[in-house]
Image (spheres, grey):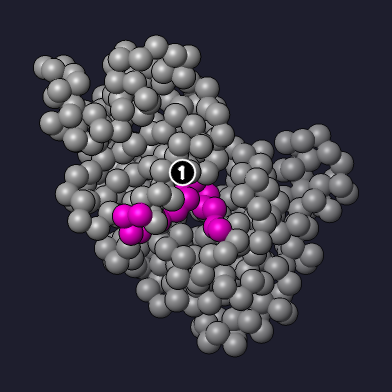
Amino acid sequence: MDALKQRASGLRSRIVFPEAEDDRIMHAVKLASRSDITRPLLMGRGEVLAEKAAREGIPKAKFDIVDPEHSPYLARYARMYSRMFHASQSVSEKIMKNTLFMGAMSVAAGDAQGLIAGAVYTSAELISVSRSIIGLHKGFTMPSSFFIMSVPGYAGGDKGVLIFADCSVNPSPCPNALADTAIATCQSARRLLRWTPRAAMLSFSTKGSASHAEVEKVAKAVEIAKRREPKLMIDGELQADAALVMSTAKRKMGGKLGPVAGRANILIFPDLDAGNIAYKLVNILAGANAYGPILQGFAKPVSDLSRGATPEDIVGAITVLSILIGGAR
C-alpha cells in the first residue's frame, strides 16, 4: 500500500464522494489531500460539508462541494436521467437530489472520473445505481470484485501477493460472468500492480480429474475467456494446490503445465461462497492483509467501502481508485 500511495501522489484524480457528510470520509479526504492523491467532489449539504472541512483543516483549494439541492448540474443531470430511463423531468430532478444517484451521474457525465461509496449506502445499492447509470465496460455482462492478498511468509504469487476474485459481488456466476471476472481481474492486475497476470480458474477438479456440472461450468468459462482474450494467461480448471504449488502441478498435470499451473498470481473462484470463505480464512489464519473489495467491470472506476471502514481503509480505496483512473486516461 505504501508503494501504491507513492504512485498515486500528485494524481489529483476527480473522485466523487456521495457520503461526504460521514466523518470518516472527510478525515480520509484530509489524509489523501496531503499528497494530492485526489481533488475530491464532496457531495452533500453545502453548509455541513464546509463546516466539516474547516474542522478537519482541509484547505479550500483542495476540494469542491456539490450540494444536490442547489447544484448547477441538477437540471442537466436530470435531463440525462430522463433520457436514460424515460422519466419526467420533475421526477428525474427528485431522483438526482439523492447523492448516490447524482454522484453516479457526475461520473457518467464526465464531471468526475470515479466514485467511492459504501460507508453508508449498501454494496447492493452502490452496484445497482452504478450499473444502471455508469454502465459496464464494453463486452462485459457483470461487474465483479477482487481482493489484494498480501500473505506474510509466502514466497509464491507475485512476491507473496495474490489477487482473489470474485469475493463480494456475484453469488453464482454463469460461465460468461466467470470469464468476465477472469479478464477484468487480469486487466486490473496489469493497471494497478503492473503485473504479468497468471490467472487460475479454480475448481475441485484439475483438467478433468472429476466430472460434475460445476466443473463443466469452470471449464466452459476458461474456453470463453481464452477465446475473448487469447493473449492473457488464463488456465483451468485447476485445484488450488495445482495452481499454487509447482511440485503438485507437475504430479497432477505431467508435461502439460502451461504458464499458469504452479505459479498463479490470480485465483478466480467458481462462486461467491468459495471466494468469500477463502479470503477470510487466509486473512485470519495466515495473517494476510486483505485490500478490497475493489470493484471492476464498470465503464468508469467505482470503489465499494465496507460500512465499517476506517479512514485509513478509505484512503486505501482512494489510492487504488486514483491509480486505476490514471491508467484509464
Residue 279 locus on image (x, y percent): 41, 47
Residue 42 locus on image (x, y percent): 61, 68
Quarter of the image with the N terminus is bottom left
326 over 25 or under it: above or below: above
Please indicate, yes or no, whether residue 300 appears anywhere in the rendered image. no
The amino acid type found where label 1 is placed reads Ile
Does residue 260 appear to the left or right of 247 in the view shown? Answer: right
78 over 66 or under it: above or below: above
Q: Does residue 314 show up magenta in the picture?
A: no
Please indicate, yes or no, whether residue 313 appears anywhere in the rendered image. yes
Residue 10 locus on image (x, y percent): 35, 68
Residue drawn at (44%, 14%) of the image = 212
Does residue 122 appear to the left or right of 276 in the view shown? Answer: right
Residues in magenta? 285-306
Does residue 48 appear to the left or right of 225 in the view shown? Answer: right
Residue 192 locus on image (x, y percent): 33, 49
Residue drawn at (41%, 67%) of the image = 37
